[in-house]
Image (cartoon, rainbow, N blue to C red):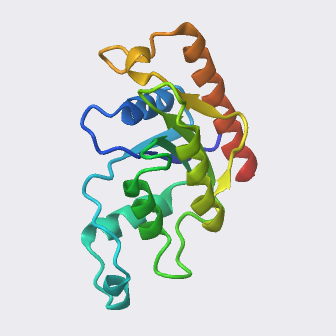
Amino acid sequence: MRTYRIAVIAGSLRKESFSRKIAKYIAGLMPENFEIDLIDLSGLDMYNQDLDDEHRPPQSWVDFRNVIGKADGFLFVTPEYNRSFPAVLKNALDIASRPMRENKWGGKPGAIVGVTPGNMFAITGATHLRQPMASLNIQLMLKPEQFIANAAALLDENGGVKDAHKQQSLKEYAEAFAKWVEKVLA
């Protein structure tokens, strides 16, 4: 059985991030032949093309590009900030897509989960995240979709999901994503 390496990227820098907790929860639902790298974006320097042009990228970019380059696929778990996705995710997308013609994302499968402590489901932020991913040639799983509202009430103190219906929904989502990765990489 083939092993797949998946980079799981939460788009929040908060210590108690709901997105990170949901990302870890979904990662725990993936099949055994899926190796999960939980990516921390907190030390990633902001992108500045001058540093690439001058062949002096920060070490954080080099390390991030290496991890993304080795990944077979990506699971993005994003909060919604001001009806879009957070800058930290856009920065990560830009860094691993550069220098030009060295896009580390291209052709690989991906999926997006939207998470919010509010009741609006983070649909707009997750939908906005699709736009740059299309340009980067990330092969997005479009269905099933997974949007999580009221994340604070949904999660227990250990980051587990309390609601049985949502547990089942996330299990089905993880299974669909695993099948999507296998299909795209077949």
Task: From the viewer's perspective, tell me whether residue 132 is left or right of residue 181.
Answer: left
- Along the line of sight, the residue nearer the viewer: 26 or 146: 146
> Where 17 falls versus 125 (above or below)?
above
Q: Is residue 30 visible?
A: no
Instruction: Looking at this view, name the residue that lies furthest to the bottom.
Output: 54
Residue at left 51%, top 10%? 163
Residue 63, image quadrant: bottom left
Q: From the top left corner, tell me how far across and down residue 31 is, in percent.
A: 58, 30
Q: From the top left corner, tell me how far across and down residue 79 is, in percent.
A: 44, 40
> Where 167 falls versus 121 (above or below)?
above
Q: From the top left corner, tell me how far across and down residue 174 is, in percent.
A: 60, 30
Task: From the viewer's perspective, tell me whether residue 22 is left or right of residue 108.
Answer: left
Instruction: Looking at this view, name the residue that lies furthest to the front.
Output: 82
Quarter of the figure that contains the N terminus = top right
Query: How many marks do you count on the picture?
Result: 0
Residue at left 38%, top 82%? 49
Residue at left 52%, top 36%? 122
Q: Is residue 156 visible?
A: yes
- Along the line of sight, the residue nearer the viewer: 181 or 145: 145
